[in-house]
Image (spheres, rainbow, N blue to C red):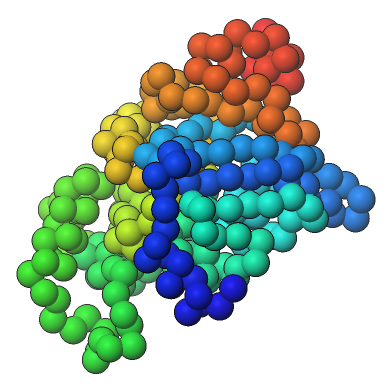
Amino acid sequence: MTLETSTLKREGLDTTHGAILYLNDITVSFDGFRAINKLNLDISVGELRCIIGPNGAGKTTMMDVITGKTRPTSGTAFFGQNYDLASMTEYEIAHAGIGRKFQRPTVFEQHTVFENLELAMKMDKRVRPTLFARLTSEQEDRIAATLRLIRLNGQEDRLAGLLSHGQKQWLEIGMLLMQEPQLILLDEPVAGMSDAETARTAELLNELRGKHSIMVVEHDMGFVTEIAQQGKVTVLHEGSVLAEGRMDQVQADERVIDVYLGR
């Protein structure tokens, strides 16, 4: 699928059916090893879905498939009704509205917090005359609103490299938001955070619930419990869905206890 085709399809993206992501019988094999094994998963529009499971369960590979980093050996992956993710490049997928944040924050440390958000802002870079050209009042308002949302208002003139680990994580989430994604993938967003930072991150994601579709891969069960609320939690094991349901349901599932939670 060409970028031009992707752009045209994005304008007509139809999510009225209630789901924004479909993974159907996805299998990924590496030298005979199945990292993903006939995985079926769907994410609803505006849903915050938590993905848990032991190391090696296929969580990262699943995200790699969704973002185009890894091609499935078999199966289909669709974003909305119109995007066949397996036929798109990583750039096309990002342009279509899927944003991903890795576990380790990647911000521009020699630029200020404000400049990081400005650099990430979705706009036509071809018609922008120079980097950091004068922003419109609407663009400045968007950055100000994002700074408040990610708890960094008052820090906008600080170099990103001087932020704490948790603040860098929030800044990177803010940079994703500036790109106006419809689906956000977060890989262990609270790893290495203090308890206070973890709690504030839970507040942030709960505020984003309903405004974006969000997939969170995380090992911190306290954090998952805080953001899962009455939403759905998916447990992966050996590349497939082992269990799915409310947090209390998966915590009581004997299979999940045996392979992940422990007794």
State the residue lying farthest toward the left: 137
Please provide percent x and percent y for residue 29.
83, 51
Task: Pick the residue in front: 57 or 234.
Answer: 234
Residue 188, x across and y down, in percent: 51, 41
- Seen in the picture, residue 96 relative to 14 is either above or below; the reply is below
Q: Quadrant of the N terminus?
A: bottom right
Picture coordinates of residue 129, whole percent (x, y)? 24, 91
List the single residue furthest toward the bottom: 129
Front in this rendered view, residue 12 or 65? 12
Q: Which corner quadrant of the image does residue 237 belong to?
A: top right
**Looking at the picture, does residue 67 appear above or below residue 237?**
below
Q: Is residue 119 visible?
A: yes
Question: Residue at the location (14% across, 76% down)?
Answer: 135
Between residue 46 and residue 195, name the one nearer to us: 46
Residue 109 in sight from this viewpoint: no
- Count of numbered badges drawn on the protein: 0
Q: Residue at x 60, y 68 (%)?
A: 88
Query: For residue 205, which quarter of the picture?
Result: top left
Residue 173 percent location from the top left of the image: 36, 52
Residue drawn 55% across the image and 20% down it: 245
Quarter of the picture containing the C terminus is top right
State which quadrant residue 90 falls in.
Answer: bottom right
Residue at 52 percent of width and 64 percent of height = 93
